[in-house]
Amino acid sequence: MTPWCLDIGATPVTGGVHFRVWSPLADSVEVIRCARGEEASCPLSRVGEYFQGTIPGMGPGDCYWYLLDGTLRRPDPASRCQPGGVHGPSQVVAPDSFAWADGQWRGVVLEELITYELHVGTFTPEGTFGAAVERLDYLQELGITALELMPVAEFPGSRNWGYDGVFPFAPHHAYGGPDGLKSLVDACHRRGLAVILDVVYNHLGPEGNYLHAFAPYFTDHYRTPWGDAVNFDGPGSDGVRHYVIGNALHWISEYHLDGLRLDAIHGIYDFSAGHILRDITRAVDSLARHLGRTVHVIAESDLNDVRTIAPPESGGHGVHTQWCDDFHHSLVTLLTGERNGYYADFGLFSHLEKAFREGFVYSGEYSRHRRRRHGSPSGDQPPRRMVVFSQNHDQIGNRALGDRPSTRLSPEQLKLAAGAVILSPYLPLIFMGEEYGETAPFPYFTSHGDPALVEAVRRGRREEFAAFGWEAEVPDPQDEATFRSALIDPELRSGGWHQQVFSFYREVIRLRRQLPSFRRPEREEIQVTGLEADRVVVVRLCRGQAELVVLFALAETSCRVRLPFRHGRYRKLLDSAEPRWGGPGALAPEALDGGDEGIGITLAPFSVVLYGRDRDDRRRNGGPMPTEEG
């Protein structure tokens, strides 16, 4: 089997560069070569709906335009590099010129993902891929196993969340371009870290989107909150699907990425017989098998539609895992008391209990926020099909001020939230800075060049938050100070309560990685009990003779509870209330030895406590027990 290669865009070949562009709307396409201040045009030949040809004398580093019908000058829809930004010419890149050092890398299996989401521009003061490399040892110290980069495709200006990208194949020039991203991925692999990239297939940004002139990439049959929907099922959609699937495979093949996070799939409309999500996942799986690597496809969705993650043989799309907003909403509303906007659907203790037990809280029930029934049952899906979090870029940045939980919650509540995510049966994700209680906000920011668009974005943000019930003054997205305010400072982890929170995160992640029961729990191995009167959720994981019990206490005062299962001897592995984590003092005993009526235990306010079976006790009762450290 020959290696996969991108068949659109500009590809260096012996003696020149081969160009291929999908452009059924044009009668003619020429390549305008930009070299040494001079321009020369070369026509391409039509082959079906594509124009293609090889131009001698061109090579990597050369810039070019496409000229449509002799009048319209446009960058390449499949440009690998935009050195002058979204309105400038494209640049030829040799996809195989980078000297990779990760030949033995095989990836991180799904159940071992502990993901750290970051924004390249605000992760370091320099805001580049190269600067991010300098902080990888810090992330290793934390213990995470995967980085997830917010979108890096070329967007207008130098400041953006990334969801306004308009050149899906081109890493942003201000971040360091193609070689910068490859260097970051290579450095991650040398440290045993996987890299997941957030990709946007539901829309393109409003500034610098030149695809309309080439082909029917978009449709007005559907609308997204961000503009025209991508045309996945209408006339001409075969070329669109080829473009998008090619984009997914190019990230994996040319950049050695270990996963793709598909942004907001509820904005991807496809009523064809074979859904684009299924086709993307199948293509990724096929390439991963050929490369001998583990590669993940992760969906962001607010549909609560189990078909996203159900296998194709069960009528699903087969996406490997998906973000679970319901877990976040259930947890955060209990900790903060907020009920605005979509939080109106949450706030009951039973919601968090169900989130721990099944994932989706709304699995067909009536949603006040949506004013209709919502969701489908997910309780039969393996827990590894869900990614959970107490923070992410959306849940922080889509607040009026972009304020973080650390500005509203106590350190005890922050540790409880960390434990709930990382010690859950699901795949944990943390957002940059969360691990030490970063207080810098993460507001929405842009650097558009179109004054009318700038004002439209400002007005839209104000109206959005007014409808959500927030009365605070919304930071100006276009103001560079808004962007600067989001820069994180990991040095905070070296002192005060930040140090204690950081040490707690490290310990919880260490336990998650060390204890076998967390690695691949199945539904039948998990028992979830809600003690609503005491506001305590008990999660019990049983694998063979090994057993873990995690208690999440959400009460504001200490409480004594009786565990809802029979006797057994347990030893304490973690207690967030201990003084070494900055807690008020542990109330839960170091060991438990219950009787037939269950085990009584006192829990500190807003605490998480983890117990494991005592192997020696198991032996005294007639049989060996596998150690949880093994």
Image (cartoon, rainbow, N blue to C red):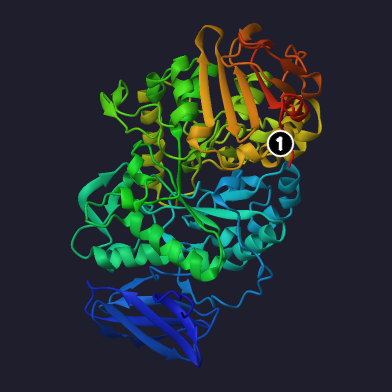
Q: Nearer the viewer, residue 430 or 317?
A: 317
Name the residue at 59% across, 44% down.
Answer: 115
Name the residue at 40% across, 64% down.
Answer: 283
Judge the density around disc 1: few (<14), some (14-19), many (≥20) Cα neighbours within 10 Å. Answer: some
Q: Residue 130: give x, y in percent of width and height.
A: 68, 59
Image side of residue 39 versus residue 583, left or right: left
Q: Residue 300: give x, y in percent of width and height.
A: 43, 43
Image side of residue 109 versus residue 85, left or right: right
Q: Nearer the viewer, residue 343 or 163?
A: 343
- Rendered view: 564 above or below 497: above
* Residue position for label 1: 628
Image side of residue 195 versus residue 602, left or right: left
Given the current orientation, which residue lies at the most extreme front position? 622
Name the residue at 34% across, 55% down.
Answer: 278
Residue 544 appearing in the image: yes
User: Dividing the picture into quarters, in which one does residue 285 lie?
Assistant: bottom left
**Helix, strand or loop for disc 1:** loop
The C terminus, quarter of image: top right
Q: Residue 131: give x, y in percent of width and height.
A: 70, 55
**Amino acid type shown at disc 1:** Glu
Q: Nearer the viewer, residue 548 or 485?
A: 548
- Rendered view: 18 above or below 374: below
Image side of residue 545 versus residue 204, left or right: right
Q: Residue 497: give x, y in percent of width and height.
A: 76, 24
User: Dividing the picture into quarters, in which one does residue 118 lie?
Assistant: top right
